[in-house]
């Protein structure tokens, strides 16, 4: 953990700007949506970023965007929509730093939980989220275009007001 922090120290986090959308979309296509129809293209990314209920951030250095994350806020639950780090920058703590930023934002916004879906064929990301305290809640066969199953995972931040997170 110590090493990871040192190696990634040249990479800093900031809210995403419109000018980042093209790189974010390309990373989504290549890292997250590989083998599926490209949904989070530049226009979709810009639309997400313009939404008041959405937070988007990038990890960047002198060479450009090295990682990005998008999270949407609901009434009590936030949804981690996208998270990606360029392959040459992975396992240096950047993913953790971005999720920690989002966790802080979710707590400030009073969210009871954070939920996400990830491809069931992505054991590395599954391990990453388990390490952050997320728990498996459901397996969703064919979730991605009928082709690939998803794991739904959730991190409880506090007890939900109506008990919604206890049941799903
Ligand atoms: C998942 C992802 C965002 C993690 O970001 P990261 O910056 O590499 O993660 P960190 O360096 O903060 O954390 C690394 C830890 O996560 C886990 N992990 C991350 N990638 C892993 C992999 N490929 N295999 C096994 N464990 C992995 C490990 O516990 C690892 O710790 P270790 O290196 O000491 O073993 C990044 O690997 C990625 O962009 N993957 C492709 C896109 C993706 O899967 N996005 C998530 C689903 S939307």
Image (cartoon, helix red, strand yellow):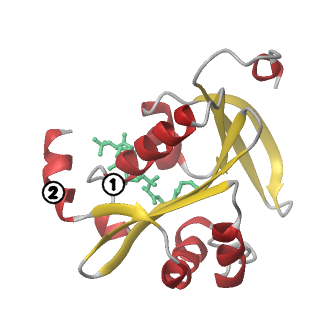
Mark 2 or mark 1, earlier in chain: 2
Taking the image as shown, residue 14 lies to the left or right of residue 167, namely left
Residue at 27 percent across and 82 percent down: it is 63
Q: Is residue 32 above or below residue 129?
A: below
Q: Is residue 114 above or below residue 24?
A: above
Taking the image as shown, residue 132 lies to the left or right of residue 120, namely left
Locate residue 73, reporting x and y percent.
69, 46
Residue at 67 percent across and 14 percent down: it is 159
Locate residue 157, reporting x and y percent.
57, 24
Q: Which residue is at the front of the view, 132 or 109?
A: 109
Can you identify the residue that label 1 sits on? 94
Q: Is residue 155 above or below residue 81?
A: above
- Using the numbered discs, state the Cα–Cα distance from disc 2 to disc 1 in whole angstroms: 10 Å
Locate residue 61, reporting x and y percent.
26, 73
Q: Which image quadrant for residue 89?
A: bottom left
Q: Which quarter shows the C terminus?
A: top right
Can you identify the residue that label 2 sits on? 7
All told, the count of numbered labels is 2
Q: Give the number of the disc on residue 13.
A: none
Around disc 2, counting alpha carbons within 10 Å, would you say few (fewer than 14), some (14 to 19), or many (20 or more)?
some
- SS assignment at label 2: helix
Q: Is residue 11 above or below residue 24?
A: above
Ligand 1 is within 8 Å of the C-beta of the residue at disc 1: yes
Q: Residue furthest right?
A: 146
């Amino acid at each position: 953990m110590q090493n990871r922090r040192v190696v990634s120290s040249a990479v800093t986090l900031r809210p995403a700007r419109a000018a980042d959308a093209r790189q974010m979309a390309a990373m989504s296509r290549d890292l997250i949506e590989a083998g599926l129809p490209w949904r989070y293209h530049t226009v979709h990314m810009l639309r997400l970023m313009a939404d008041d209920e959405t937070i988007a951030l990038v990890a960047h250095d002198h060479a450009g965007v090295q990682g990005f994350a998008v999270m949407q806020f609901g009434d009590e639950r936030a949804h981690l929509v996208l998270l990606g780090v360029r392959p040459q920058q992975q396992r240096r703590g950047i993913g953790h730093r971005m999720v920690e930023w989002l966790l802080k934002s979710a707590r400030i916004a009073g969210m009871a939980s954070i939920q996400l879906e990830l491809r069931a064929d992505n054991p590395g990301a599954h391990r990453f989220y388990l390490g952050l305290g997320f728990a498996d809640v459901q397996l969703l066969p064919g979730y991605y275009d009928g082709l690939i199953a998803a794991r739904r995972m959730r991190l409880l931040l506090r007890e939900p007001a109506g008990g919604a997170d206890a049941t799903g």
